[in-house]
Amino acid sequence: MIQIHEHKAGDAAPRWSAADRRLRVESELELALVNGCITHRPRAVRPYEKTYAMDDRHAPGSQVFVAHVHERPAGEIRLSHAWNGYACIHQLLVAHHHRRQGVGSALVQHAVAWSQARRRPGVMLETQHNNVAACRLYEACGFQLCGFDAALYQGLSPPVHEVALFWYWRP
């Protein structure tokens, strides 16, 4: 059973390993604009590993929630109120050995409930076109792909050639 609790300042933070922040990329989403709607389909690529940097910064007013399975940390989500009124998912992480067990879905559903309890118009988040598993999760949870930005990560040093995808959930 998955239980989700708010992580309060002063609580011991879960220690996420590099494996928890890593994913194997075997496909990327190919995007197209058709009749004003963004369509996407996975396209196989030469497999490679991607590791997200651990970001311990908190957006102003953000809250962190930790999912537990058998009283052990299994995932984490960071939520805040965005400038446009939406709730915003800043980070979603599922421990490597708990993936594909419903932890990510439970955390996203928690974000939706959190948004509704605060009378927000919906939930927004950003991920990348090479995180196909996350994109499938968001779509399965009722999110729609509403925008993308091919230049967002090009300012990093060295530049990263990923496409930022913007997903929205609305009731």
Image (cartoon, helix red, strand yellow):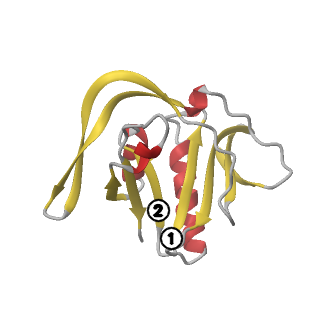
- Residue 137 in view: no
Q: In which quarter of the image is residue 96?
A: top right
Q: Mark 1 and 2 residues: CB-CB less than 8 Å, in contact?
A: yes
- Secondary structure found at label 2: strand
Q: Residue visible at 31% across and 31% down?
A: 27
Describe residue 23's horizontal placement relative to residue 4 as left or right: left
Task: Measure the alpha-carbon separation of dots 1 and 2.
Answer: 6 Å
**Sequence-wise first label, 1 or 2:** 1
* Three-letter residue code for mark 2: Met
* Three-letter residue code for mark 1: Tyr
Which residue is more in the foreground, 154 or 115? Answer: 154
Rendered position, 114 above or below 152 = below
Rendered position, 49 above or below 63 = above
Describe residue 41's horizontal placement relative to residue 143 as left or right: left
Q: Residue visible at 68% across and 33% down?
A: 16
- Secondary structure found at label 1: loop
Task: Name the quarter where the C terminus is drawn.
Answer: bottom left
Describe residue 62's horizontal placement relative to residue 43 as left or right: right
Describe residue 63's horizontal placement relative to residue 166 as left or right: right
Q: Mark 2 sits on what residue?
A: 124
Q: In which quarter of the image is residue 26?
A: top left
